[in-house]
Amino acid sequence: MTVVIESDKIGKNFRLGQYSIIRECATIGDDVEIAEHCVIGCKPLSFNKESMRTTPVRDIPKGRITIGNNVFINSHSDVVTALEDVTIIEDNVIMGQRVIVGHESHIHKNVQLMNSVVLNGYVTIGEFTMVGTGALIRNRINIGKNCIIGQGSNVVKDIPDNVIAYGNPCVVHGSNTLVTKVVRKITKEVKKVI
């Protein structure tokens, strides 16, 4: 079992699968599980105009990765190091197998990314959103809160809050009122208990 942990900023009850790498730029919260063959801190790619090729960034990126509490990252998934700022995965996020989170992306609380989802750089996903298997999200896209993005969607434009969207290109097909109602009800119940 080979693992590489370069970061000393790891919370309690951390579990790491075989053949995974945690780079020093990562800060990881409590109760996080990262499965086999994952890399947290991949170098981003840059486009070389002279050779017309994409190549790994040669300099060490100056950015960071922050992963919140109660996060599960399944096998063969990568989180790319931010170039200058920070790549953020907030609390209670679930990522399926073979998910790629691009640099400077921000995944808010309670998001589910199903298998083989690809988020390019500077993507923001609002809380309580679910992104279906194989969805591709272009650079600099914002997806709102309480959304459902259908499997295989190609997201090339921002998606507002509380909608169901799918397709190639991904377009809004309706309101996500059921999830919104359930979230509001649960929030009210939790506030009563607290």
Image (cartoon, rainbow, N blue to C red):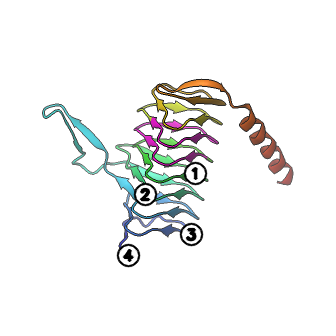
Q: Which of marks 2 and 1 is in front?
A: 1
For the residue carrying disc 2, how many other residues have a C-alpha within 10 Å: few (<14), some (14-19), or many (20+)? Answer: many
In this figure, which residue is indicated by the disc labeled 3?
12
Amino acid residing under circle 2: Ala
- Per the rendering, the mark at residue 26 is 2
Label 2 to label 1, Cα distance in Å? 16 Å
User: Which residue is found at the position 47% from the left and 63% from the top?
Assistant: 35
Amino acid residing under circle 4: Met
Q: Main secondary structure of the magenta part?
A: loop
* Mark 1 or mark 3: whose residue is earlier in sequence: 3
Horizontally, residue 191 falls left or right of residue 154, namely right
Instruction: Provide the secondary structure element on which disc 1 rests.
Output: loop
* Mark 1 or mark 4: whose residue is earlier in sequence: 4
Q: Which of marks 3 and 4 is in front?
A: 4
Q: In which quarter of the image is the C terminus?
A: bottom right
Q: Tell me whether the residue at label 2 lies in contact with that at label 1, contact meaning CB atoms closer than 8 angstroms.
A: no
Q: Which residue lies furthest to the bottom in this view?
A: 1
Amino acid residing under circle 3: Lys
Label 1 to label 3, Cα distance in Å? 17 Å
For the residue carrying disc 4, how many other residues have a C-alpha within 10 Å: few (<14), some (14-19), or many (20+)? Answer: few
Residue 54 location (% of width, % of height): 23, 39
Q: What stretch is highlighted in magenta?
A: 111-136
In this figure, which residue is indicated by the disc labeled 1?
93
In this figure, which residue is indicated by the disc labeled 4?
1
For the residue carrying disc 3, how many other residues have a C-alpha within 10 Å: few (<14), some (14-19), or many (20+)? Answer: few
Amino acid residing under circle 1: Val
* Mark 2 or mark 4: whose residue is earlier in sequence: 4
